[in-house]
Image (tube, grey):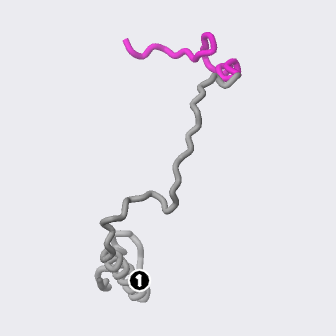
Amino acid sequence: MSVDHKTIQKIAHLARIRVSAEEREELASELSNIFDWIEELDKVDTNDVDPMTSVVQASATLRKDNPNDGGYPKKITANAPEAVEHFFTVPKVVE
């Protein structure tokens, strides 16, 4: 796919960037190369390739869920405006 100066000017306008006449020539060449590469990649048959999120087979390691109170509930509720038996108390908002 060939990118011309008019297309570069429109892209620059949409991106809100100023592109000089000298830069337009270089950008047109670079974008044309990128689009040619995309067209070449489009020819690759990927029907038998499974989608993947990484090139390395890795899975997240899970740890056992052991809930606890942190061991210092008095310190946690020390700055609370109001606490009852190491729990935060809040005003009722649903009637």
Determine the residue positioned at 36% across, 75% down. Answer: 12
> Residue type at mark 1?
Glu
Determine the residue positioned at 30% across, 77% down. Answer: 43
Above or below 63: residue 21: below
For the residue labelled by badge 1, is the local secondary structure a helix, a strand or a loop?
Answer: helix
Q: Which residue is mark 1?
A: 30
Residue 4 image point, x, y percent: 30, 85
Determine the residue positioned at 33% across, 75% down. Answer: 44
Magenta stretch secondary structure, dominant: loop
Quadrant in the rendering for residue 28: bottom left
Quick check: 63 left or right of 55?
right
Residue 42 image point, x, y percent: 31, 74
Residue 90 image point, x, y percent: 52, 16
Residue 14 image point, x, y percent: 33, 69
Taking depth in this image into account, of 80 and 31 the one nearest to the observer is 31
Magenta region includes residue 9: no
Above or below 50: residue 95: above
Q: The C terminus is located in which quarter?
A: top left
Which portion, as a residue range, is magenta? 72-95
